[in-house]
Image (cartoon, rainbow, N blue to C red):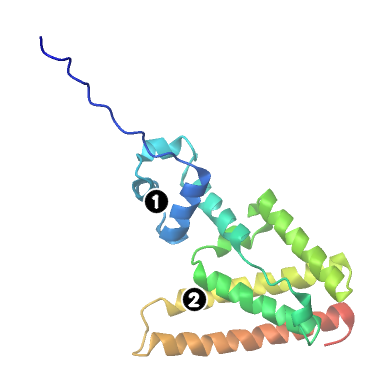
Amino acid sequence: MEPAKKTATRGRPPSITRERIVDAGIEMGLPNITFVGLAAALGVSHMALYKHVANLEALKAMVAEEIFTRWQIPQDCGEADGGLKDYLIVFATSVREFVKTHPGLTPYVIRRAAATAPMLAKIDGHQALIAQGFGVSKEQARWLLATVAFHCMAVADTVYTVTQREPVVETARDTEEAEMEVELARGMEALVVGALVLVEGVA
């Protein structure tokens, strides 16, 4: 009597978790995310991915939220020897690097209507920290941080979008980017000084 043949069994399909989705999305980069591409990175079908995320825009928003949540916003007020002015310049530098590291992120974080509850909670906590650390009102901290973040994100996004394009004339891309970053830094310092004059009457 022949032994019964074992039927072939498939291994367990890869689990689809939010963490795996966002990790794969961050690795791909927001501009490059597609349902098919991200599903392939996870080792699942794109139809299986649709059971967890409604559409491509929701997928990108999820990844953007996680990128923002993981962003290490400068927290140590004590390191700013020059007071609030120096802190805001450090903050602006962090924003610039954040935008540079994550192309395509700006539209998901610059519009308040696009911000999710976790993003808003992180922003609110940061504003409270700065208000307490530098002895300004919560409303003053909110306006200063929002003003610096909004303008820095918008300008940085423009700078890095431009420098990634093919140059009109023959020029070193790194040199062009470095020159534009210097101008961006100077512009943000001018913005910080002006904003402090409006809020506190001091630069």
Whether residue 106 sits left or right of residue 41 in the image: it is right
Placement of 150 over or under 173, stated as above or below: above
Report helix, strand or loop for mark 2: helix
Q: Please say if 168 is above or below 23.
A: below
In 3D space, how far apart are the residues under numbered discs 1 and 2 (Cα atoms)? Answer: 22 Å
Residue at position x 88%, y 72% in the image: 136
Please tell me which residue is depicted at 68% across the width and 51% down the height of the picture: 118
Image point 11% across, 13% down: which residue? 2
- 153 or 27, which is in the foreground? 27
Give the quarter of the figure containing the N terminus.
top left
Q: Which mark is residue 160?
A: 2
Around disc 1, counting alpha carbons within 10 Å, would you say few (fewer than 14), some (14 to 19), or many (20 or more)? some
Residue 13, by quadrant, is top left
The residue tagged 1 is 34
Q: Position of residue 66 (x, y in %)?
A: 57, 55
Residue 203 appears at what percent x and percent y?
82, 88
